[in-house]
Amino acid sequence: MHKEYLMGNEAIALGAIAAGVNLVSGYPGTPSSEVLETVAKRRTSDIYVEWSVNEKAAMEVAAGAAYTGARSMVTMKQVGLNVASDPLMSLEYIGVKGGMVVLAADDPGPISSQTEQDTRHFSAFSKLPCFDPSDPQEAYEMVQEAFEYSEKYETPVFLRPTTRVCHGYASITVKDEAEYKVHNFEGFAKDSGRWVVFPRLSYQNHMKIEARNQTLADDFSEYSRNRIYQACRKNVLLKKGIASGGISFAYAVETLEDLGMTKLFKVSTPHPFPERLALSFLEGLTEVLCIEELDPVIERELTYICGKYHLPVKIYGKLTGHVKNAGENSRDSVQENIRQFLLMTSDFSDKASADSALPTDALPSLPVRPPVLCAGCPHRASFYAVKAAMKGKKTIFCGDIGCYTLGNAMPLDMVDTCLCMGAGLGIAQGVGHMEPDTTCFAFVGDSTFFASAITGVINAVYNQADMTLIILDNSTTAMTGHQPHPGTGRTMMGEMVQKIDIEAVLRGIGLRVVETVNPLDYGSSVECVRRVAEEPGVKAIIFKSPCIALAKPSGSMTIRSDKCMNCRKCIRELGCPALVISEGQVSIDASLCTGCSLCGQICPANAICPPAEKDKGGVCHE
């Protein structure tokens, strides 16, 4: 054993490797992405790892491996679990032979997601066990235990870390490589009575699942990570208890170290709920405060148990308004919730404040930093070209999930709708069928095109829609950390493979008009949009230019003061962070500017000089 300073996601990855995982598949999504990336970086030679084209494919690949008896793990964020739910909901009835861990990272806040959905509900919905780590060390150990439980009960299991566990750092104890488990497996054994999902088999297995979960609930009552901490200090409130799990438990422990310990129930397996252990916790208590992210899962379970066994215990939490019911918990919010519960003399049932924290005047105000497309981002040029080409026309611009969602910000204002990955195509079709006079555009990135947009294109062609598909091809999966995808020509195993040609795919689907243009060539881009948008039916423009994080900047632009009219068109229309006002005049921040030259191409006075026209002293010349 040795110590390493690790991010929670790195700890989970090393835990899976130590457990003898044979295959890891997934689709990138914050806050989960680093798990698979760390497996790829630190893996032993017998581990296969892949970024799949989407979460559904990743789930099926991991299931296939588990059918052979191999240990597999599939990684995604909570929204990706929606995509993977189709195979997962059937897989619960089929079961697995080798251990299979479904890592679904939840994003309270949400910090980088469309939803705050709680995977613990999905665990109950799918009738699968769920493990909820509270810190990186526990996440490292818990993923190894999850594999053991998965094999013991022949079922996939959830591991549900939240953002602060995934991205928190700690010095943790990990195994040396010599201590790693080597998991040998016998291979797939044909048995249609087990592996082929028929209605009769599902009915029989459903009864087995319900019985299994009752056994699991008892098993989890003995699981060492579900634990009751007894009050052991002077002047504590022995009739009050706190129930918590995940990162909220860590906040609760820190708070109680300051305020004084009371009876504390740590729930590490929210489903099946450790009912027998919960009864032991509730014994002798009159009030319990539940602190958890995101939904009142623990609170509902304890309320149910109190009703089932006629216990005279008041359960407080999100449902009663004593803990905020949206957003992530913080050390400060948990401290205030517990302080009110333990120390206030007034009746807590008056619910003094669900959202109270430190007084606002005790904290300095933070500077406003709205998210924005990077300086030099080719997506800005793409949006601006479409906006210029369609000026004065009735249009709808349907967006998607990715960096380019930021195209909604002023002054671009180019994202009218955004639902989920690939949905912009369907929405554009629906609007177009109802409003034939509207020129409909759907924007999608190159990675999302492969993940979830191809079906939408096929639907549009088949149902004779009239729309323009804009593919923003920056040769990476930029928003989640520049992971490879089928269009990049490389895999997560480091292999160089044939690129999947987006234009060829579109033509294969049936599109007759497909054009590729460099968005940083403003004139050509505008002309291309005008021409293609006039074509009937489904047509596509591929704006192809690498992400600025991948391409080396060519130097910064410079403003010629003798020509600049200070009209500020560049600032008013582009919103590039490298364009600033300094002493009343438009200026360029050379530390941010990448020399993309878009501002120079739209300047009415030709006052912005590209790097190629500057001498070594930075002076512009005609």
Image (tube, rainbow, N blue to C red):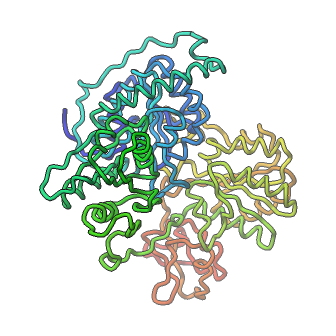
Q: Does the image show residue 368?
A: yes
At horizontal 54% and vertical 38% (from top left) the residue drawn is 125
Image quadrant for the N terminus? top left
Residue at the limit of the structure toward the left, as seen here: 234
x then y, percent, for residue 106? 46, 48
At horizontal 33% and vertical 30% (from top left) the residue drawn is 144
Q: Does the image show residue 37?
A: no
Work out whether 40 lies above or below 91.
below
Please state which of residues 390 and 113 is positioned toward the viewer in this rendering. Answer: 113
Residue 515 placement, left or right of 115: right
At horizontal 31% and vertical 50% (from top left) the residue drawn is 249
x then y, percent, for residue 376? 54, 64
Please state which of residues 402 and 296 is positioned toward the viewer in this rendering. Answer: 296
Work out whether 230 lies above or below 211.
below
**How many callouts does the rendering have?**
0
x then y, percent, for residue 113? 52, 54
Please state which of residues 574 and 522 is positioned toward the viewer in this rendering. Answer: 574
At horizontal 40% and vertical 56% (from top left) the residue drawn is 317
Please state which of residues 210 and 560 is positioned toward the viewer in this rendering. Answer: 210
Image quadrant for the C terminus? bottom right
Work out whether 588 lies above or below 71.
below
x then y, percent, for residue 285? 28, 49
Residue 473 placement, left or right of 615: right
